[in-house]
Amino acid sequence: MWAALAASGSLGALPDGTNPGGWRLVRHFDFDEQASGNVEQMPRHWYAIGQRPDTINSNFMTQPLHRALVGRSGFPAYSQVGFDSSQHISGRTSFRLGVAGGSAGAFLEVGAVPAVPGSDYQIAAWVRRDNLRRARVRMTAYLIDGEGRLIESSRAWAEPPPVNDRWQRIAVRVLGDDEQAAWLGLTLEVDQPEALADSPLGDQQVVYREVQGGAWFDDIMIWQVPRLIVATQSPVNVIRDPDRPRLSLEVRDMAAQRLMAQVRVFDAEGRLAASMDRWFGDGSPANWLWQPTLDRFGWYVLDMAVYETAETDEADRPSPGQALDRTLSALLWLPAQPSQVGGQMTGLALDGENAAAEQLSLAPQLLEALGLRSVVASCWDPQTTLADLDQRLAALDPLIDRTAKGGRQVTLSLGPLPSELVRAVGADDQSALWLLSQPTQTWEAYLAPVMMRHGQRVRRWQMGCPLRSQTAFDRDLPRQLAAARAALAQLAPEPLIVLPWQLVYDRRGDVAAGAAYILDVPPAILPQQLGEYLESWRAGGDDLSALTLLLRSGSAAELSQDRRIADLALRMLHAWEAGAHQLTLARPWTVTANRPTQLVPDPLTGAFTTVGQRLAGRRMIGRLPLGPGLQAMIFDGPQGGLLAAWNESAGPDEAQLDLYLGPAPVATDVWGNGLPLQLVDGRHRVSLSTTPLFIEPIDAPLAAFRAAFQIEPTLIESTQKPQQRLIHLSNPWPQSISGTLILLGPQSWQFQPSRFNFTIEGGGSVTLPVVVKAPVSEVVGRKQVRARLTVSVGREYTIDATTPVEVGLPGLDFDAQLTLENGENGQIDAVVTQVITNLGSQTLSLYAYASLPQFPRQEQSVAQLQPGESMIRSFRFPQAGDVLRKHGIRVGVREINGPAGLNMILADR
């Protein structure tokens, strides 16, 4: 559901396929007018922008909007605007705007479509781009007052994605807020890039235009729709406990039809959490308040749909009929903000690059509600021009003022570059860093006003977004960096340049120290790979505090919400483990179509906040072995010890944390919902999932002591010979400790000795020699050596600990597969295929075997296996299907004249 909600960009539009009802259809332009007698080139009520109108209406040019559009420059008379039969979505013809060096456009005449003040209108169209590379295709809708003037505040537009030769549906909503509205207007445009009259480059500009191409429009439909508003008590839709979410709902319909609203609240996993129905239009209020009953913190989707009503029984009880409209929103309900971590969360930031002005005005409230300390904002957006630069700066002013006063940090990004500036300097593929290395007059008019207003309070200046940055490959990077630093230093004291980079590319040795980096971490990089990628930066001597990771998880269209949330939490944990504590969340919000604009947080924003609160001020002190497929990290800091644990690959029955964690631990999920853990037989037990669980407070030194239990080397050779190994223990406490260690397993393993007494000084460690012998029947693979430790530190603790070892042979690789085949009489035969590879430097003489109860043991020779050579051996057990349901097949390979061998058990799964 979030996929549809986020993809719309502005929430509240009709979903694809929704039909508001035939009688609500105000106008349908299908552009099939020949049958009704229109033999002209232009559809009725449509006129070409920039061309003299062909009309007998003597009052046509008295309308201010008509005069402005007919006189608009850049739309030459030779543009091909009119009916076209070569492409259409329905019928026989469509409306084509063809370009030949200039722009092309058409507008709907004033008076063609009446508008009712207070009504909202939905306009949808099918569009197909034709051979366009740089030109922009746009449908703009707006209201017109009784004097024929465009009402600027009502203007809304939609653009199809830049994909040629495919029909695409676009939709836009016009909000009928202005009481002066009399008519609805539309313009369709294919706009060419133009030279800028006020560009610093003057007549030196290079402008690339389309020589041929255009766009087709078809089936433009205009509906009158109800006005739906879903809002919470927070303009950023983040509510903190003890406050509870309260919804303000409104359905305003100028059609005065009896309607029914269905309001549904869904949690992040798509489960229905609360619902209500309401009928109105018969005198009942059109707006109401509702406090849904929610029993857990989390992220919730708010879904309100409006239906026509149908009478179904003699009691005159209505039921839902035709769906008319739908609006979506979302909220975050989080625990009360912990005061002790606020100042420690400066390194966690939200990425607000390219956000519109009305969104920037809400960013400080979002930071305050989330308890975060940093935000990235753009100096400009692509639509910024020199003419309206002051408006953009006016939007930045309150963000920087309020953020700075709250002790927070703003990073100003010089990306995206204004389209006007990009066209003026011919810098289609150039970066902000390149721009600042050009002569001052190239960029001064755009950047100097920003620096003059904010250069004294903003230190971090980011050279654009790292998602598609090619900075790492720029041969001229050292010179550009030096030039950019010098340019900024003229207007800001000690500016810190933040270079956009991609984590998959190493740091360059020719870049001077003193720059910071923001590294894009794409979804393709797995969380557990972060440490490996960051190792190259650490090896180069970089302080990871100068690195910021831009964390990106898959979109809601690609992954379920629980997988997105688990992925982000794991990215944060692995980044923290690697020492990267400066984290920024990409795309943290969308917006609603409500009045006024509201921010709607992505569910990742909630997980980013709550996980960040737990990690802030803490450092990772080790990993805690829990068993195969389970992972746990130990953190410690002023807030106390914390254990983050999750299930990486274990089956549901094995995904259990089962150990003593401290006097009163609480398991908390990524939303902040806490569950006190009960002590049962001296242990705390909790089920683990793929999403990390955070357990605190824990006795961090006790957990670190348990995690320090290791056996080295970890390879236990599969021979009958006893093997010397070393047990390692470390003392994380400042004082000396003493205790005992008893080795308990694996079952049938022999340890000499199996019991140890130890004393370790504060902060020290000890190594205990042990002889290990695994049974001849032990199978290859990862095993857990179990031990019970009793240690005295002020009081006596008894700890069960495990450490992983691997059973195998260093010079021999063995793999076996079980397949089932149809045998004689329709019975199932079991076929075992073994691959034996000599990884050593000596020739081996072996034999392979396979054994299944109720069948004779089978053996085959693997003689004179040369170094680097592999041999395949196969075994067949006819009619073994029934036996396989109860028993596994034991397979293996052994030395003919030696003690070494490898065993494996294959089962029918």
Image (spheres, rainbow, N blue to C red):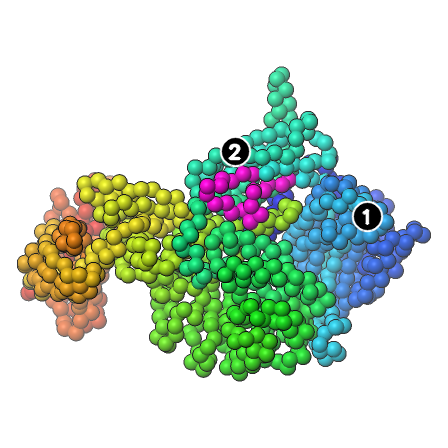
Residue 200 at x, y = what percent? 71, 76
- Indicate the amino acid at tag 2: Ser
Q: Which mark is residue 275?
A: 2
Q: Which stretch did the figure color magenta?
A: 228-247
Please state the total of marks drawn on the protein image: 2
For the view shown, which residue lies furthest in the top direction? 314
Residue 379 at x, y = what percent? 61, 66
Q: In this figure, which residue is indicated by the disc labeled 1?
A: 145
Is-magenta flag for residue 867? no
* Nearer to us in this view, 767 or 370: 370
Residue that appears at 30% across and 58% down: 636
The secondary structure that dominates the magenta segment is loop
Relative to 45, is 340 on the left or the right?
A: left
User: Label 2, label 1: how many angstroms apart (C-alpha)?
Assistant: 40 Å
Say which label, 2 or 1, has the lower sequence index: 1
Query: Image quadrant of residue 535?
Result: bottom left
Residue that appears at 36% across and 61% down: 576
Residue that appears at 66% across and 28% down: 284
Mark 1 packing: few (<14 Cα in 10 Å), some, or many (20+)? some
Mark 2 packing: few (<14 Cα in 10 Å), some, or many (20+)? some
Residue 830 at x, y = what percent? 22, 48
Residue that appears at 40% across and 49% down: 670
Is-magenta flag for residue 230? yes
- The answer to whether any part of residue 268 appears in the image is no
Q: Circle 2 sits in a helix, a strand or a loop, which is it?
A: strand
